[in-house]
Image: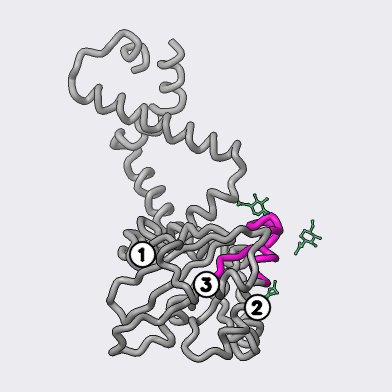
Amino acid sequence: MRFSTTSAILGLPLLAVADVPEYQAQFENYLGQAQSYLGSFASKIPQPNKHDPVAAAEAKAGSLNLDILALNTWKDTLYGPVKPESTTPEEWWVLITGGNKTCFGHCGKIESAFNETAGKWAVTPGAPHTALLNCEDQPVLCSAWSAPVGAIWIFEMLPEPAPIDIWTKRFNMTTATSDDIVTLQKEGYKSSAKLHDGFFHPFNGVLAKNGVATPVGYILWGFNLLPSWAFMILVSLLSRTMMSNRMNQAGGGQRPAAAGQAVAR
Ligand SMILES: *[C@@H]1O[C@H](CO)[C@@H](O)[C@H](O)[C@H]1NC(C)=O
Ligand SMILES: *[C@@H]1O[C@H](CO)[C@@H](O)[C@H](O)[C@H]1NC(C)=O
Ligand SMILES: *[C@@H]1O[C@H](CO)[C@@H](O)[C@H](O)[C@H]1NC(C)=O
């Protein structure tokens, strides 16, 4: 009997409202409201992305020649040095870093090693370009890329619309030094780094190709903020809705109802 009680209380009233002609106008009214709410949704989302253009310009102009990636500018930044007719990739080394919240305060060592490396490469002709992605400041971009803090991502940038290879390399975050990074670049990263692939690939992935990486980044970031009890309630509401939908379909199919269902209707 538990089954019938649950569905009667939670599932049926909602579905009933959608079905009964007298309520249809009301239902459509709600639908209109929902749509207009979703329309203005983007402007209502709290703005989690922090980007300080002045500090970024200083980092770029300074001795490190380091770019700071942000949600709205990362693509232009990475394509920046790529010439339209170029057939050899422009190499970008990007450190995914974070602070106390996103990296539990463990990113300091690798970040200084990376900064030191950027300083060396800034005065080395033909050296890779360097950039930082800070997940504390750019949580949505990190979610959209599903990028793990502490890793170095090596982008091989070719002119659009060529696919972009990305190699990922993790260092031991407690021991990494600038020399480790310099050596990796000198000796070639392809034997020890991993070729990045899959859904979340910033250029070749399904999400990026369909232009939904950023919205998905917002959604994943949102789920991260949700306390786990809220998540459980959400999941249980969704599964109840699905259960009553299925019941409704079974009823419409004129199949003889089982005893439990007969009570529910
Ligand atoms: C990060 O945590 C350390 C140790 O708990 C603390 O000393 C430091 O001030 C924190 N930094 C920030 C930016 O909150
Ligand atoms: C690395 O360089 C960036 C840009 O100049 C700076 O914001 C950051 O604090 C530096 N990190 C460390 C650990 O020195
Ligand atoms: C990193 O290096 C330290 C010191 O050598 C070692 O204790 C630790 O296990 C290493 N961590 C990983 C993930 O390899």
Give the extent of the magenta segment. Answer: 93-112
Q: Which residue is mark 1?
A: 208
Gap between marks 1 and 2, in whole Å? 32 Å
Q: Report helix, strand or loop for mark 3.
A: strand
Q: In the rendered structure, which disc, 1 or 2, sits on the residue that comes first in sequence? A: 2
Residue lying farthest top?
Answer: 259
Ligand 2 within 8 Å of the CB at mark 1: no
Q: Which residue is mark 3?
A: 94
Q: Amino acid at mark 3?
A: Val
- Find out whether residue 174 is within the magenta segment: no
Q: Give the quadrant of the N terminus.
A: top left
**Toward the viewer: 138 or 230?**
138
- The answer to whether mark 1 and mark 2 are in CB contact below 8 A is no
Q: Which residue is mark 2?
A: 116
Gap between marks 1 and 3, in whole Å? 19 Å
Image: 225 above or below 242: below
> In the rendered picture of this protein, how many numbered marks are placed on residues?
3
Pinpoint residue 80: horizontal percent, then vertical percent: 43, 86
Residue lying farthest left?
Answer: 254
Residue 258 falls in image quadrant: top left
* Residue in view at x 65 percent, y 69 percent: 177
Q: In the rendered structure, which disc, 3 or 2, sits on the residue that comes first in sequence? A: 3
Circle 2: is it few (<14), some (14-19), or many (20+) Cα within 10 Å? some
* Residue in view at x 66 percent, y 82 percent: 55
Circle 1: is it few (<14), some (14-19), or many (20+) Cα within 10 Å? some
